[in-house]
Image (cartoon, helix red, strand yellow):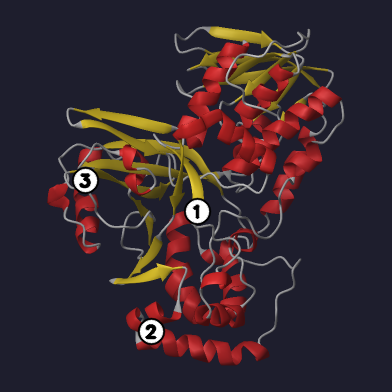
Amino acid sequence: MSAGSEPVPVAESHRHAVVLGAGPAGLMAAWRLREAGYRVTVIDKATTVGGMCATLKFATDDGDYYFDYGGHRFITKNPKLLAFVDELMGETLLHAERKSVIRFQGRTYDYPLNLPNLLKNAPFSLLFGTLLDWLAMPFRRRIGKDEECSFADWIENRFGKTLYRHFFEGYTRKLWGIEPDTLSADWAGQRISLIDLKDVVRRLWQRGPSTPRTYARKYRYPKLGFGQIFDTLHQRLLEQGVEFVMGAEVSGLDTQQQRITAVRCRTAAGREQQLACDEVIATLPLPQICHWLNIPCELSYRALRFFNLPMQQQDVSDNTWQYLSDPGILGTRLQEPRRRSPHMAPAGRTSLMFEIPCQQGDELWQADNEALWPRIKADMQRLGVDPTKADGRYFTAYCEHAYPIMEVGYQRQREAAISALLRYPNLVMAGRQGTFRYIFTDTAMEMGLMAAEMLIEGVDRRRQIFDHRNENTVIETQSVA
């Protein structure tokens, strides 16, 4: 796998693969298929590539500001994928370092927690409660690794009620829009690396080499935003002859004898189009694919709204992002894009991004920017950010399918949908939405490559793709300590 700097001739094939979605998984699948000689068509309802990993440019008289859809970083344990991105991006790929904090009840905590900072900032009730929870740990029944339980049960069982209520409960409820005792513990197992409170206490005393294995401080990041990776890949694919149908929304799938024979879509001009195909790689939401194939599926997603605004100052803080655990604050994270790259804002200026969880079509989703701005200003004041430094310009970006909602028992629904989809041998699902998994960019890119390799080699590996990197810890995440 090599990005290359010049178009490489390919041996043409008569097979036509249609890729649904121009995000990381879809673009990598298109790359590998075209390399193998397939005719490839990529369809996406957006007018730009990248999906959730795209970057938006906000042009002003002062210069250009760049905003990602959330807090992306490129980190991977896959040396081939790393080499691919390094070669693709060249000198535009910077090396950055993450610094994060937790904001809760007017206090600021280092993230990950460390003992001197905790002793300096935490109220006595938190310290005393954590101590009591730690002393009670030997007498608490441990929840088994394979035992189905809720997020609340999993956290309390391992960390105690005090840390749960301070650092997990309100934040989790705000992020997911459901009660923590109805959220599956799968999310905790994949996001929190520590074993229990004893491990927390040990790591609080030991810094440096004891940094949790899932907390990666250093990472690669493109000069002009994370989406620059996929914009560059898009150009390479165009040079290779991959066809892109952008601004077109897929409207259905035609089938015959348990095979997908064509993809139907509606172009930006309102014209209905039908593309005959031999193979389909779908990175669109799994429930939507099920709907088109008349497969029952009640799985759903949590949406995000990003409120972006330029600031008339050079820096707001030295933090890449701040976790906002107070339930009364609208967002879950406050991010400052130029902490990843100084080129994300004009010289002498910075910008802010508030991540606001919501549901598509609810009050927060539909509120216009002017109605939302007073609430954002109030939250800025609570966080010690001067709202008068905002220059009055702001805009919103939306992500309809940001997080798969993993309620207790979702595994059975997901498995039933997967079993039904596996009956269509020329349909391969990949990516975060397509597999209904809370995965990161490198895993999505690997899934796209796996999907392409499967078609090229003629070996059914769809089950492996659905469960790719389904371990209990992932490199991009961070533990409580």
Q: How far apart are marks 1 and 3 (CA)?
A: 34 Å
x, y percent for residue 242: 62, 13
Question: Horizontally, is 404 left or right of 370 in the view?
Answer: right
Q: Residue 13 sits in which quadrant?
A: top right
| Residue at 57%, 12% in the rendered image | 239
Asked if residue 232 is positioned above or below residue 8 in the image, the reply reads: below
Pick out the residue farthest to the left: 388
| Residue at 37%, 31% in the rendered image | 56
**Residue wearing tag 1:** 218
| Residue at 33%, 45% in the rendered image | 338
Pair 2/1: label in front:
1
Residue 119, label in figure: 2
Q: Nearer the viewer, residue 270 or 103?
A: 103
Tell whether label 1 touches label 2 (CB within 8 Å): no
Pair 1/3: label in front:
1
In the rendered structure, which disc, 2 or 1, sits on the residue that comes first in sequence? Answer: 2
Q: Would you say residue 325 is visible in this rendering?
A: no
Query: Which quadrant is home to the N terminus?
Result: top right
**Residue wearing tag 3:** 373
